[in-house]
Image: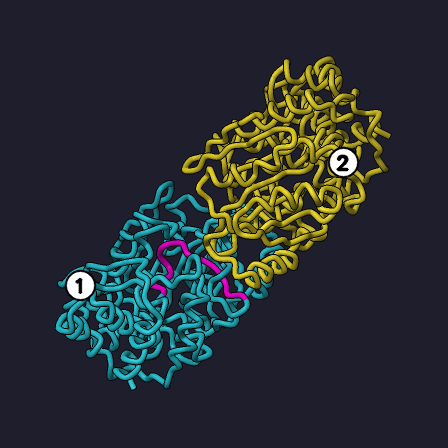
Chain colours: A yellow, B cyan
Amino acid sequence: MNRIKVKIPEHEYEVVLGDDIIYDLKNEIQHLDLSSRVFAIIDENLFKLHRSKISEALSKFKIEPKYVIIEAKEENKSLEMLQYIFEKLLYYQCGRDAVILAIGGGIIGDLAGYAAASYMRGLPYVQVPTTLLAAVDSSVGGKTGVNFMQRKNIIGAFHQPELVLADTKLLKTLNKEEILCGLGEIIKYGYLSNEDFYQKIKNNVDNILALESKVLSEIISESVKIKAGVVRQDEKESGLRKILNLGHTFSHAIESEQNYSIKHGTAVIVGISAALYLSENLNLISTEKLNSLLELINKVKPHINLSKMEGEKLYEIMFNDKKNREGKIKFVLVKDIGEVLIDVEADKESVINAIEKAERLFL
Amino acid sequence: MNRIKVKIPEHEYEVVLGDDIIYDLKNEIQHLDLSSRVFAIIDENLFKLHRSKISEALSKFKIEPKYVIIEAKEENKSLEMLQYIFEKLLYYQCGRDAVILAIGGGIIGDLAGYAAASYMRGLPYVQVPTTLLAAVDSSVGGKTGVNFMQRKNIIGAFHQPELVLADTKLLKTLNKEEILCGLGEIIKYGYLSNEDFYQKIKNNVDNILALESKVLSEIISESVKIKAGVVRQDEKESGLRKILNLGHTFSHAIESEQNYSIKHGTAVIVGISAALYLSENLNLISTEKLNSLLELINKVKPHINLSKMEGEKLYEIMFNDKKNREGKIKFVLVKDIGEVLIDVEADKESVINAIEKAERLFL
C-alpha cells in the first residue's frame, strides 16, 4: 500500500493506493474519526461489475450504508441529478454526522463531491476513484461541480475530500477508451514534471494500456504526487494550478465542437499536441524542440481516433470558455519538459494553425 | 461612517456602515481591487422604492452593471431561482472577472451569495443589506444557501463577502414587521453579549422600532461587532458559532409549524423566550433569574402577535432539524447575560412545557 499526503492550507488528507484495498475503507474512515453513517454514491456500471466486492466492503460499517446508484454519463453531471441526490439524502434523513462516499470515476466524483459540498453547507466526503482518470486526476484536488447549459463544470465548489482510496484492482475492468482518458492526464504530467517521468511514460505506454500492475501503481503514485504538489501551492487556481490545464483549453473546446462524441482522453491528447504546435507558432520553442516534445505524443498516436474538426468553430468555443478573463483566451504552453508558461495570449491565426497541425497529426 | 473589520482565517473584510453611503459603492469596490464588471442581484420591492438612488450608485461603475431583479419571498430562495440566476449570468457572459452584488435583505443575500459561491466555483461578492435583519445578521458571516423540500438553508455554502456596505438610509422604508425581524436578532445579541448592551437595547426598543438614526447606527454597529467576533473564532460552526442559534432551534420550527405565515422576527423572539423557559425547566437558572432575563422580552411583547401553536408538532419538527446530530435536539440556553450554553439536550416534556409557557406569554 502506498500513501501520499495532500496538504492544503487548513486541510490535509491522504491518497491511499493499493491492490484490493477497498476492504480497508471502513478502517481508514474510522481512523479519521469520521462517522460510520455512510452515504455511498456509486457508478451504476461499476456496481454491476463489482457488486459483491463493494457490498462486502460497505457491509463492514456499523450502520448500514445507504446507496445512491447513478449512471455515470456526462448528461447526469447536472443540477437535476444533484437535486435527485439531495432528495435521497433528505429521504434517508442524512444529517451533519454523515460521510458521503463517491465510488466511481470523474463524473461520480464531481457530482457526489459537489453534493457533499452543498448539502448542509458541506459534509465530509471520501473519494474512491475507480477509473484511471479519476485516480490520477479528478479525485485529488477538491474541484467538484456539474455542467449547466452546455458549460462544463460551470457550477461547483472547491471541496477537499477527507481521504482518497484508490483500489487498483477495480481498474482492471476498464476498457481501452477509459484507460486512454487517464493516459491523457498522465501524459500531461509527463510534460509538467521532469525528464525521468516523461521517459518513464514514453517507455511504458503499452504497459499502461495493458494495466500492468507494477507500472500502473508507480505511474499513478507519481502522478498523484505531482498533482498534490501543485494543489498544495495553489488550491483555488489563482496561479500555478493553471499549469494543470495544459491541453485543456483546447480539449474542452474539442469535446464541445464534437458534441461530446469524442472521448475526453483523446481530446486531451489532441489538445496537448495543439498546445505544443502553438508553442512553436509563437516561437517559444524551435522546430527541433517541438519534434523532440512530440515523441511521447507519437507513442500514443496509434491509439487515437480523431474525426475532422472545425478550427474556426473551436476558436469561438474557446473564446467563450470560463477560463478566459476579460475576453482573452489564455493558454498553457510548454517551453520544455517541466517548463511551462501560463496565461499566454495568442493571435487567432496561430491558434487555428496549431489546431490544424494537431489534426493532421492524428487524421 | 463606521468601519468594522471581520477577520476569518485566510480572509478579512470590512462592514461599512453609514447614512446615504450607497454612492460610495463603486469607490469601495475599486479600493479592494475588484473588477468593475458588476452583476447586481436586487430585491424587486426595494428597487421600486429606491430606484433612482440605486441606479445612480450603480451608474458610477466604468462598465454598465447588469441587473437581476428578484422578488424577495421565501419561496424564491430555491434551487429553481438559483438556476434562473445562473442562466442570467451565462446569458450576460459573466466570467471570473466579475463581482456579484447582493442588494436586499436576507433572502437576496443568501440567494445571491450562494449563486456567487457556486458559479465558476466561486466569484467575489459584496453584500448591500437593506433590511435591519440583514444589516445586523445575515450579511455578515458568509452563510449562504437556499431552501429545499421544506428545509430552510439545507443547500448552501460558507462563502465570505469581500465587503458589506450598509446604508442606513435604505432602512427608512422598512415596515414594522421588517424592523421586528432585525430586532429579534438584536435582542439575541443582548443575551449573548454583556449587561451594558442588554440594557441599551432594553431602554431603546421604541427608538429602534422608530428607526431613530443615532441609536440605530450604534445598535447595528455593536451587533455586527458581536457577530464578527463570534464568526472569527468559528467560521464553520463547529462550536462557538452555535451560540448565534439562540432561540433559532425553536424559531425555525415555529415558522415551519405556522407554514411561514408568522414573521421570522416574531418567531425568533418567541423562540428566545422558549429557550429562557427551558433554561429554568432544566434548573439552569432560578425563577428569579428567569424573571430578570424576561425583562427585555417584556419590553417588546406589546409588538408581538402570536397565533396558537402545537407543542407536540413543534417538537417533531425540531427533531428533524438539520442542527441536530445523531437524532438528538441540541439547544442553546442562557445561564445569564453573556453566559450561554450550547449543545444542551432536554427531555421532550421540558421542551414542550417551555413552548407552552412562551406561548402563554404572548397570547
Report the front residue among B274 and B252: B274
Magenta span contains residue B194: no
Residue named by callout 1: B336
Cα–Cα span, label 2 and label 1: 63 Å
Write down the quadrant of residue A203 in the picture. Answer: top right
Q: As drawn, is A347 to the left or to the right of B58?
A: right
Please identify the quadrant where the C terminus of chain A is shown. top right
- For disc 2, the neighbor class at 10 Å (few under 14, some 14 to 19, many from 20) is some
| Residue A51 picture location, percent across and down | 71, 45
* Residue at (28% x, 49% y) in the render: B5
Instruction: Kindly identify the amino acid type of the residue bearing the numbered disc 1.
Output: Asp
Write down the quadrant of residue A256 in the picture. Answer: top right
Q: Determine whether the residue tagged by mark 1 lies in a helix, strand or loop.
A: strand
Q: Determine whether the residue tagged by mark 2 lies in a helix, strand or loop.
A: helix
| Residue B110 picture location, percent across and down | 45, 61
Report the magenta residues as a range. Answer: B134-148
- For disc 1, the neighbor class at 10 Å (few under 14, some 14 to 19, many from 20) is many
Write down the quadrant of residue B139 in the picture. Answer: bottom left
Residue named by callout 2: A173
| Residue B204 seen by the camera | no
Q: As drawn, is A342 to the left or to the right of B139?
A: right
Establish if B307 lies above or below B317: below
- Residue B349 numbered tag: none
Q: Chain of mark 2?
A: A
| Residue B142 seen by the camera | yes
Instruction: Kindly identify the amino acid type of the residue bearing the numbered disc 2.
Output: Thr
In this rendering, which labeled residue sits more in front, label 2 or label 1?
2
* Residue at (67% x, 31% y) in the render: A168
